Amino acid sequence: MQRDTNAGFVSLEKELKDIELLEQIIAGWENEQKNTVEALRHSVDRLSKEALSRIIKKMKEDPVTLGALKEVLGDEVVYAVLRYHQLVKPSLQERVELALSTVRPMLATHGGNVELVEIEAPSTAIIRLLGACSGCPASELTLSEGVEKAIREYCPEIQEIRKAPAICSNESVAVNFISPFARSESVGWVFAAQLDDVPENRIKTVDVSGQSVILVRSAGRVMCYQNACAHLGMPLDMGQIENGVLTCPHHGFKYALDSGECLTAPVVQLQTHAVRITNDRVEVRIE
C-alpha cells in the first residue's frame, strides 16, 4: 500500500480559507449563538497565546533552543500563528505596508495612491505614487511630508526611500498643485527634552504622557524607545551603549541603537516611538 506523503500536512492557505468560510457561516447566526462562539474563541486564544509565550520565553534562555526558534520562524504556519497572537513582530514589508495604509486616505482625497514596489536589503524602500499624485507638481512634498514620514515612523531602520518611475496611463486624472499633506495638523506630539540635553551615545530617561521612555542620540539622529527590555521588560536606563549597540544591564540582551532591533533574539525588538525635532525641542508621539 502506497504511503500518503501528505498525511498530517497543513496548508496555511487552505486553513485560512476554511476559517473564512466558517466565519461567514457564523455571521448568519443569532447574536446569542455568535456571542457563545466568540467567547469560546477568545478563551482558546488566550490559553494558546499563554502556552506559546511560555515556550518562547523558555527557548530564549538557551543559545541552542534560541537558534531553533529563529529557524522555525521561517515556517509560514508557525509565523502566521505567532503573528496572529502578536508574539512576533511584523516583517519589514508588513510594517511598510501598514505605514502606507495610514497615508492612503489622505492621498485618496486628491485622487492619488501609493504602492510599495520593493524593499532592497538592508534599509531601502522603493515606492510608487499613483493616480493624480504621480504627476502632481507637489509630488515631492507629498513624498517627503506624507509617505516618507509615515515609513520612517513605522520602520526606523529604513534609511533610504526612493520613488519609482510613474506608470504611464491613458486615464485622465485631475492635477492638484497642493499636496494633501501641505496643511496636515500636528497631533499627539509631546515635548520630551531640549536637544542639547540629550547626550551623544548615552541614555536620557524621561516621562512622557505617564510613560517612562529613553532618548538616545547617535550619528545626528535622536531615537526614542520604551524604557523596557523586550526580553523581560526590565528598565534599560542603566544600559551601556557601545559601537551603536545598546546592552540591557540585566540579562545582556543587545539592541541596534538606530532601530531597536534585538541582536540577541531577532524575533523581538524594542518598542519605538516617533521623534521629531522642532526648534531644538525633542518631541515624541506615544502610540
Image (tube, grey):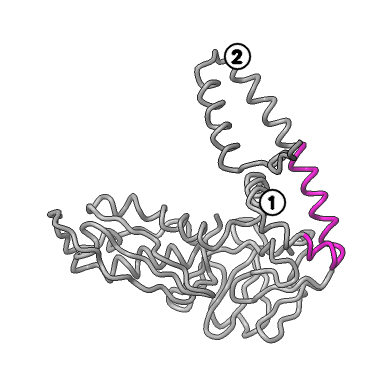
Q: Nearer the viewer, residue 83 or 68?
A: 68
Q: Residues within 10 Å of mark 2 (few under 14, many from 20)?
A: few
Magenta includes 197? no
Is 108 situated above or below 219? Answer: above
Q: Which mark is residue 45?
A: none
Magenta includes 64? yes
Position in image of residue 76 (x %, y %): 63, 52
Is 238 situated above or below 94? Answer: below
Position in image of residue 39 (x %, y %): 67, 25
Relative horizontal placement of residue 116, taking residue 30 as reference (left or right) = left
- The part of the chain drawn in magenta is 47-68
Residue 186 quadrant: bottom left
Position in image of residue 159 (x %, y %): 48, 76
**Residue 280 visible in the current orientation:** yes
Q: Residues within 10 Å of mark 1 (few under 14, many from 20)?
A: some
Q: Residue furthest front?
A: 1
- Identify the element where label 2 is drawn: helix
> Image point 52% across, 74% down: which residue?
121
Relative horizontal placement of residue 214, taking residue 100 as reference (left or right) = right
Relative horizontal placement of residue 180, taking residue 147 as reference (left or right) = left
Quickly name the residue at label 1. Answer: 87
> Image point 57% across, 38% down: which residue?
14
Quickly name the residue at label 2. Answer: 32
